[in-house]
Every structure is written in C-alpha cells, then in structure tokens.
C-alpha cells in the first residue's frame, strides 16, 4: 500500500461510541500503512487498543472469515478498509 494512501472505511456493525469507532479506523489505517501481513496488522491494532483502552482486546484481520464472538458492551466494531475486513472487540 502506498505510504500516504488512506483507504476509506465501511463500518458493517458496531457496538461502540462514534469517537472510539473513529479511533479504531485510524489505528487500522496506520497498521495497514506499516504492515502488509494480516497477522501483523491485527497484532498492531490489538496491542495499540490494549495500551490505549486497557486489556483485553482481540483483533481479526482478513478477506474471508466467519466469526461469532462475545464482547463487552460498547466495545465491538466490524469494518472494512478496502477489501480487508477488521473485527475488533474487547473481553474481560
């Protein structure tokens, strides 16, 4: 991905404040600029949210996956950046 390119986000589902949604999208955009491997993108997002918002966050990044998760209220977002899906949620 080009260093200065920001891919627009398309939120598919969220149980999260608007501010935190925007923060998640910005962190994911940063991750996608720094890394090309999905596991590394997910690791960056997870660690950044653990640091900013407290543990324990989980992040799944990919183009083709199913999921069914339990999350803390107001701590879930599922969105796309380009063709890449990002699932970010917090558990106790």
Image (cartoon, rainbow, N blue to C red):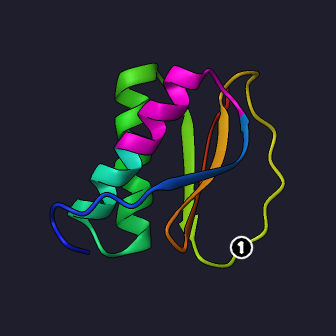
Question: How many numbered badges does the structure rendering display?
Answer: 1
Is 19 covered by the magenta stretch?
yes
Q: Secondary structure at mark 1?
A: loop
What is the chief secondary structure element of the magenta stretch?
helix
How far from the left and from the top, in percent, is residue 5? 25, 63
Q: Is residue 85 left or right of residue 41?
A: right
Please state if 89 lies on the left or on the right of 34 as rendered: right
Quarter holding the C terminus is: top right
Q: Which residues are magenta?
A: 15-26
Q: Vertical placement of 64 versus 84: above or below? A: below
In the displayed structure, 79 sits above or below 73; it is: below
Residue tagged 1: 65
Give residue 79's position: percent from left, percent from top. 61, 53
Nearer to us in this view, 82 or 50: 82
Residue 49: quarter of image: top left
Q: Residue sitting at 54 percent across and 37 percent down?
A: 57
Quadrant for the N terminus, please. bottom left
Q: Give left or right: position of 67 versus 24.
A: right
> What residue is shown at x 39% (from left), y 61% (from top)?
7
Task: State whether residue 67 is above or below residue 19.
Answer: below
Residue 20 colored magenta? Answer: yes
At horizontal 79% and vertical 61% (from top left) the residue drawn is 67
Residue 21 at x, y percent in the picture: 54, 32
Neighbour tally class for label 1: few under 14, some 14-19, many 20 plus, Cα within 10 Å: few
Give coordinates of residue 87: x percent, y percent.
62, 52
Which residue is more in the foreground, 64 or 2?
A: 2
């Amino acid at each position: 991905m080009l260093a200065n390119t920001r891919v627009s986000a398309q939120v598919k589902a969220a149980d999260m404040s608007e501010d935190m949604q925007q923060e998640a999208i910005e962190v994911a955009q940063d991750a996608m600029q720094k890394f090309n491997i999905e596991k590394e993108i997910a690791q960056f997002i997870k660690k950044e949210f653990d640091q900013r918002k407290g543990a324990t966050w989980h992040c799944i990044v990919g183009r083709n996956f199913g999921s069914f998760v339990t999350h803390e209220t107001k701590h879930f977002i599922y969105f796309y950046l380009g063709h890449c899906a990002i699932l970010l949620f917090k558990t106790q």
